[in-house]
Amino acid sequence: MAGSTNINITPPRWLLAELTYACPLQCPYCSNPVDYAKYPNELSTDDWKRVLGEARKMGAVQLGFSGGEPLTRKDLVELVKHARELGYYSNLITSGYGLTEEKIIQLKEAGLDHIQVSIQASTQELNDHIAGTASFHHKKEVAHLVKKHGYPMVLCVVIHRENIHQMPQILAMAEELGADYLELANTQYYGWAHTNRDLLLPTKEQFEQAEQIAQAFKEKVAGKMKIYYVVPDYYEDRPKACMNGWGTTFLTIAPDGVALPCHSARDLPGLDCPNVNDYSIQEIWQESKAFNFFRGFEWMKEPCRNCDEKEKDFGGCRCQAYLLTGDMYMADPVCSKSPEHAVIQQAVDSAKATASLASDEKPLVFRNSRNSKAMSSVVDTAV
Amino acid sequence: MTINPDQPILFSPLHRLQWEEAQQKTVILYPEGMVELNQSSAEILKCCDGIRNLAQIVSELEQKFSTTGLTNDITAFLEVALQNGWINQH
């Protein structure tokens, strides 16, 4: 049995509020669960306010409004206002789709601290293809408006095989738009990205080349723009310190109110992730089975259990271990010490083989309700 | 990057300086990040109001804490702050 007693439970610092799974975009690397169509219910405004209040009281201070597309929630301004009154630093994580200047001003007045706009590529053609929606020019316009109204502007570009060759142009675009921060997020292969991995995973050579270009740029813009580089863990020797340790820092609330120690955790078997409709945040954080499941080191198997790096990376990501080995207690197979490490090379080889196929032989599966219903075997979901 | 002694120092409007009750600490908040400050760092940043320059900040803090000889420590910290974008001078 996982979980353990006598662990010093630190309070949550980061609350990710996934307000909705609704999204006008269809990015094929979306981190939402592939079967999101099974969860059409959304928390009410009052529920969210209570959740924000309870988490803040425990010490959460960074708040991400995310989704799906959080702008589709009609009560977003109200929630932002409430968050500000509670003292949160609030981050809006948006596609920018449908964001008007009027809304940007309203959100600023309500106390929103920062807007992160995602752009899918440096060209209209590729951006609109990946997003599954014509959105490129509007996104650039939104980026300008975010700057104009005094927000720190964070540009987020998810990197994968279809856009990795655009790295120099992506960097130039960030500079031209005046980004204060640029997040270069190498795709993490969960959810839809895992489904589409053969089509998204670049080769090691492509990664190394792109990283080199990004590194040189980082030095060039030092002092003007900060670069967050999300590491491509398939090409690392050691796993990421996922979530800064299970149940130590991060709390995600899914649109239907399910509380997750990591946003992929609802895919793990037997965790019984609790719902905020049934428990307070304090009960969830401190007492629930799910949040205690991988706290500490007692749950570990070899080679993690006696590894001198376990306090640095916590054995990596539980969701990745489960997704790639079928065993959530296993070392993250990204680690070269993992007995299952070969699955990573197999994934790389499989992606490489797929790269030589014609695009209609194996097309991308776009993230939309139709595909989600098909993958979750839901015949008809009332929305 | 070094501090220009003549120019006023401003805490960056793209960051937020805030007392956190749960942590009993002052923190700097910025997009997706947080830095916890010790008490002296927090006191220095609170003086960065865009009006006072280095010498005025030193004198203010020496007076407040009834001490002298803070110039080197304060300058060193402000240079770190400048490099991190927590303060600016224009």
Image: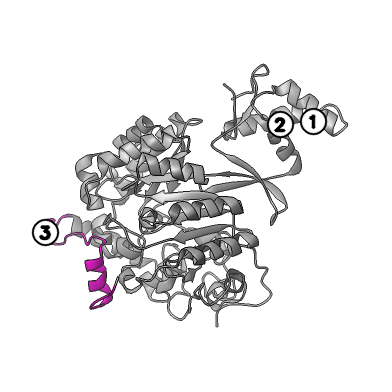
Q: Is residue A199 left or right of residue A259?
A: left
Name the element at disc 2: loop
How far apart are labels 3 and 1 at the CA level? 69 Å
Q: Quadrant of residue A28?
A: bottom left
Q: Which residue is drawn at 65% across and 22% down?
A: B8
Q: Is residue A68 magenta?
A: no
Q: Are discs 2 and 3 both within one chain? A: no
- Where is residue B51 shown, x and y percent of the image? 67, 23
> The numbered mark 3 sits on a residue in which chain?
A
Q: Which residue is drawn at 57% across and 39% down?
A: B15
> The numbered mark 2 sits on a residue in which chain?
B
**Amino acid bearing label 1:** Leu
Q: Does the magenta stretch include residue A374?
A: yes
- Where is residue A89 shown, x and y percent of the image? 55, 49
- Where is residue A170 shown, x and y percent of the image? 32, 38
What residue is disc 1 on? B61
Name the element at disc 3: loop
What residue is disc 2 on? B47
> The numbered mark 1 sits on a residue in which chain?
B
Furthest residue to the right?
B66
Name the element at disc 1: helix
Q: Are discs 1 and 2 both within one chain? A: yes
What residue is disc 3 on? A360
1 and 2 marks in contact (CB < 8 Å): yes
- In the rendered view, tell whether residue A375 sits above or below residue A59: below
Q: In which quarter of the image is residue A3?
A: bottom right
Q: Are discs 3 and 1 both within one chain? A: no
Range of the magenta residues? A356-382
Look at discs 2 and 3 and give the one toward the viewer: 2
How far apart are labels 2 and 3 at the CA level? 62 Å
Within 10 Å of disc 2 (Cα), the crowding (few <14, some 14-19, many 20+) is many
**Amino acid bearing label 3:** Asp
